[in-house]
């Protein structure tokens, strides 16, 4: 079987050790050749005879399910696109009439036109949700990963939903530690996750209730941040907990129809969180409230570099071209830190990076130059020979140049490592490992 995306057998076994069971979709190699999608359930059990821990694996062929899902998503996408264009025209026409451009509008007409505009906006929201979901399921939504202070999207969401909360006398509070690391993700999509979850909590929380949003470092995995949106709402029956993230599923039938909703908000949350390589779950007790807990990766220069490398590899794979990774490190970095202090040494690193940018961009097709700790990472659309030629040019130029550190001028030497896709690896981890090994020889 082959793991896809960020899933690895190591991560699966770690998950099973922690939580006793893992379930997910993988690709299995068919005996007739090729691959087929299967739903895999792996459970941990302890042998009652010799007290040894074992794992048992169940596989189910889901080719038909995947094909049906693909057809449904394609249908929804086509219908949504076809609806969006005329709906935009209708909204513009109603807005023009309401604005008085087409003539005087009576009070009664204004009331009905405003009602029509509200319903147009509601329908547009449903169409956008359908399009988002179809894009996410097809893997066609591009997430723009960056360093994100969670306070920013959360404050924006609370501000936009406060009028709705005040109408129900529901309070929204937040608790984010000042020393919480920045998240690494798409700011707009993180805001969408929060607005869907908080809006959902407001919908099912009675008057005088409370919605609380908190964030903390993940207790088991320091590379992630855990965010919790909890409320004092009506809660979710145990028998419905496994279905809350299913498309079009509506909790409590008649109540959901009364409060409104399409059953798309939570499935979108799940897809967006998983698109950030995180996970989402729900804890609830009827009559006491619910808590939706999701994880996001914590920002680090290393994770940002690896993510960009993976994206560039995907681009190179799609275009059928080679991609070379050149890693460079100032050999004297520790000495410079010790003598001149880290702040001055980092200024020197920035000077070296600018020189590398100047040389590289004039001589080859550079896609990215960035620093990770003391390592300067360069990605170029060139085969290995071209990467070595670039490496030699950089070293030659830098060996003749001096750099300012404090009031002194110093020379630097570079250690380097080169690795090329696809000859030496097909993942970012593969290339970084090969380049680091070469650099440390």
Image (tube, rainbow, N blue to C red):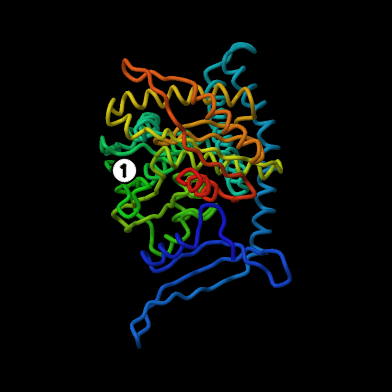
**Within the image, what quadrant is residue 358 found in?**
top right
Residue 211 in sight: no
Looking at the rendered structure, the number of numbered marks drawn on it comes to 1
| Residue 193, placed above or below residue 427 | above
Q: Which residue is mark 1?
A: 215
Rendered residue at 50%/25% (across/down): 398
Task: Compare residues 108 and 114 and report the one nearer the observer.
Answer: 114
| x, y percent for residue 71 | 69, 53
| Residue 33, placed above or below residue 355 | below
Image position of 353 (left or right of 28): left
**Within the image, what quadrant is residue 281 found in?**
bottom left
Rendered residue at 64%/28% (across/down): 364
Rendered residue at 40%/32% (across/down): 153
Circle 1: is it few (<14), some (14-19), or many (20+) Cα within 10 Å?
A: many
| x, y percent for residue 7 | 51, 56
Outermost residue to the right? 32
| x, y percent for residue 425 | 59, 51
Q: Secondary structure at mark 1?
A: strand
| x, y percent for residue 158 | 36, 33
Task: Compare residues 284 and 99 and report the one nearer the observer.
Answer: 284
Residue 279 in sight: yes
């Amino acid at each position: 079987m082959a793991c896809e995306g960020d899933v690895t057998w190591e991560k699966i076994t770690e998950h099973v050790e922690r939580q006793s069971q893992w379930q997910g979709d993988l690709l299995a190699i068919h005996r007739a050749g090729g691959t087929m999608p299967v739903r895999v359930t792996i459970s941990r059990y302890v042998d009652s005879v010799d007290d040894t821990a074992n794992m048992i694996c169940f596989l189910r062929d889901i080719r038909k399910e995947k094909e049906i899902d693909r057809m449904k998503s394609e249908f929804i996408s086509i219908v949504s696109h076809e609806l969006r264009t005329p709906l935009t025209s209708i909204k513009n026409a109603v807005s023009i009439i309401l604005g008085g451009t087409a003539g005087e509008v009576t009070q009664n007409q204004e009331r009905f036109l405003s009602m029509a505009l509200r319903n147009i906006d509601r329908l547009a929201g449903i169409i956008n949700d359908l399009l988002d979901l179809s894009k996410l399921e097809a893997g066609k939504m591009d997430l723009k990963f960056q360093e994100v202070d969670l306070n920013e999207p959360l404050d924006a969401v609370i501000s936009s939903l406060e009028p709705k909360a005040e109408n129900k006398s529901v309070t929204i509070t937040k608790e984010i530690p000042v020393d919480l690391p920045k998240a690494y993700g798409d700011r707009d999509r993180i805001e969408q996750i929060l607005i869907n979850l908080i809006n959902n909590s407001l919908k099912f929380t009675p008057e005088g209730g409370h919605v609380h949003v908190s964030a903390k470092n993940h207790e088991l995995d320091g590379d992630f941040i855990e965010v919790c949106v909890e409320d004092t709402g009506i809660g979710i029956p145990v028998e419905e907990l496994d279905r809350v993230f299913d498309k079009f599923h509506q909790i409590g039938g008649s109540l959901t129809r009364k409060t409104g909703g399409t059953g798309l908000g939570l499935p979108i949350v799940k897809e967006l969180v998983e698109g950030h390589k995180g996970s989402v779950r729900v804890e609830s007790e009827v009559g006491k409230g619910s808590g939706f807990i999701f994880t996001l990766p914590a920002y680090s220069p290393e994770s940002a570099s690896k993510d960009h490398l993976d994206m560039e590899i995907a681009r190179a794979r799609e275009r059928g071209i080679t991609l070379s990774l050149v890693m460079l490190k100032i050999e004297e970095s520790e000495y410079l830190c010790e003598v001149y202090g880290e702040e001055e040494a980092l200024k020197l690193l920035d000077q070296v990076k600018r020189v590398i940018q100047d040389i590289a961009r004039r001589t080859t097709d550079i896609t990215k130059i960035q620093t990770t700790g003391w390592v300067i990472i360069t990605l170029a659309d060139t085969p290995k020979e071209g990467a070595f030629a670039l490496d030699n040019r950089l070293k030659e130029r830098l060996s003749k140049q001096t750099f300012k550190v404090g009031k002194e001028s110093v020379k630097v030497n570079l250690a380097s490592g080169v690795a090329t896709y696809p000859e030496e690896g097909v993942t970012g981890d593969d290339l970084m490992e090969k380049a680091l090994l070469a650099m440390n020889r």
